């Protein structure tokens, strides 16, 4: 019974040490790299959105020119 208790306590301490390592050591890195990933994803999504909207604007301007004629810039 005593040996089992020691093994349980040893395993419990190892689990606590692992959790402590994750909380203390990796939390800052996870937040940093996670923030970089989110920022990169946002920039990529913004690039895609702006590209699509620019293409749609060009097509709409071409359609409006075909239906109503070129704009008179005064």
Image: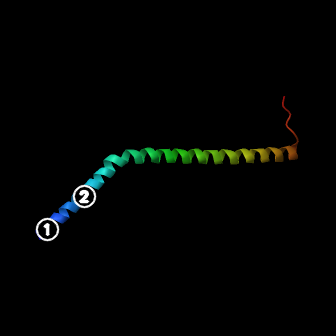
Task: Give the color scheme: rainbow, by chain, secondary structure or one colour.
Answer: rainbow
Number of disc labels: 2
Residues 1 and 23: in front is 1
Give whichever of discs 1 and 2 has the lower sequence position.
1
Residues 6 and 53: in front is 6
Residue 7: which quarter of the image? bottom left
Residue 11: x, y in percent?
A: 23, 62
Q: Is residue 6 left or right of residue 71?
A: left
Looking at the rendered image, the quarter that the C terminus falls into is top right
Looking at the rendered image, the quarter that the N terminus falls into is bottom left
Residue 41: x, y in percent?
A: 55, 48
Q: Is residue 71 left or right of residue 25?
A: right
The Cα atoms of the two marked residues, 1 and 2, are separated by 16 Å
Q: Which residue corresponds to mark 2? A: 14
Q: Secondary structure at mark 1?
A: helix
Q: Which residue corresponds to mark 1? A: 3
């Amino acid at each position: 019974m005593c040996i089992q208790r020691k093994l349980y306590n040893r395993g419990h301490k190892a689990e606590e040490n692992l959790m402590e390592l994750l909380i203390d050591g990796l939390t800052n890195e996870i937040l940093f790299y996670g923030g970089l990933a989110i920022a990169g994803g946002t920039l990529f999504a913004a690039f895609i959105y702006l590209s699509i909207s620019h293409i749609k604007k060009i097509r709409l301007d071409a359609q409006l020119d075909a239906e109503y004629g070129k704009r008179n810039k005064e």
